[in-house]
């Protein structure tokens, strides 16, 4: 499991105005809390937070957090609890950090990665990934970056479930083994629908046909 060092400064100012001021200085407002620590308001360097997110471990990275108070430095282990993003710019607005203990199990969601090309897909089927994460409980250092699942043997109509994953013995799965992860479904049939002819056009055609018939009769009479 990846470990990343992160330095933060404690802050006393809170509220929307203080948060806007921090963001204008390329800082991110944050809060650190946990079962054995009172909430601490922090500010983080934006570039440090970007680097942490890009580690590839997602929200499950273990953070060696150093909180500078001005008088001393407090060291904690933490994980990302929540990241708030701007809905338009996708910039980081706020971060929640949660205290963890390396000798106590925690509950997390780990990504599921599908590998291989399903046999049913080569026959025209469509591969659908039903579950993209797996909820587990384990010690922080035992959290995997991802669970891989080979779908190569799937034919059309076949499925793979949680029970098909290879789970180490030190990890407890918190969902049912029958939960579907991936399946190959038949291709969707597109029915051809004949376009409806507008009533005006139909009526026009009938008028033209009647006119043509009358003309033929008149010619015969002559």
Image (cartoon, grey):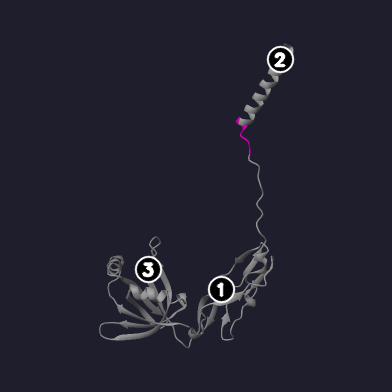
Q: Is residue 120 left or right of residue 5?
A: right
The front one of 70 and 213 is 213
In magenta segment, residue 148: no
Residue 86, percent across and down?
38, 63
Q: Marks 1/3: CA distance? A: 26 Å
Which is closer to the viewer, label 1 or label 2? 2
- The residue tagged with tag 3: helix, strand or loop? strand
Examine the rendered structure and indicate whether residue 6 appears above or below residue 120.
Answer: below
Q: Distance between the Cα atoms at labels 1 and 2? A: 80 Å
Look at the image and say whether residue 198 sits in the magenta stretch. yes
Write down the quadrant of residue 95 in the picture: bottom left
Q: Which residues make up the magenta segment?
A: 196-200
Q: Which residue is mark 3?
A: 92
Q: Would you name the residue on which mark 2 appears?
A: 219
Rendering coords of residue 93 (x, y %): 36, 67
Circle 2 packing at 10 Å, graded few (<14), some (14-19), many (20+), is few
Q: Residue at x 61, y 31 (%)?
A: 201
Coordinates of residue 104 in the picture (x, y in percent): 48, 86
Q: Residue at x 35, y 76 (%)?
A: 48
Q: Is residue 219 above or below residue 186?
A: above
């Amino acid at each position: 499991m990846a470990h990343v060092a992160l330095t933060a400064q404690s802050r006393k100012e809170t509220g929307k105005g203080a948060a806007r001021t921090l963001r204008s200085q390329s800082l991110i407002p944050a809060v650190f809390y946990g079962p054995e620590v009172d909430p601490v308001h922090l500010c983080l360097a934006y570039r440090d937070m970007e680097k942490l997110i890009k580690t590839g471990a997602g929200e499950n990275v273990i953070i060696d957090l150093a909180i500078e108070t001005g008088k001393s430095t407090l060291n904690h282990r933490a994980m990302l609890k929540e990241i708030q993003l701007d809905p338009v710019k996708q910039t980081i607005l706020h971060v929640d950090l949660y205290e963890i203990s390396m000798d106590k199990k925690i509950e997390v969601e780990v990504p599921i990665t599908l590998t291989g090309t399903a046999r049913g897909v080569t026959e025209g089927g469509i591969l659908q990934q039903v579950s993209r994460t797996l909820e587990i409980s384990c010690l922080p250092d035992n959290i995997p970056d991802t669970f891989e699942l080979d779908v190569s043997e799937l034919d059309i109509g076949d499925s793979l479930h949680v029970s098909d994953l290879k789970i180490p013995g030190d990890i407890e799965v918190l969902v049912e083994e029958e939960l579907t992860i991936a399946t190959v479904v038949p291709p969707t049939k597109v029915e051809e629908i004949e376009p409806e002819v507008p009533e005006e056009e139909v009526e026009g055609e009938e008028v033209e046909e009647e006119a043509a018939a009358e003309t033929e009769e008149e010619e015969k009479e002559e």
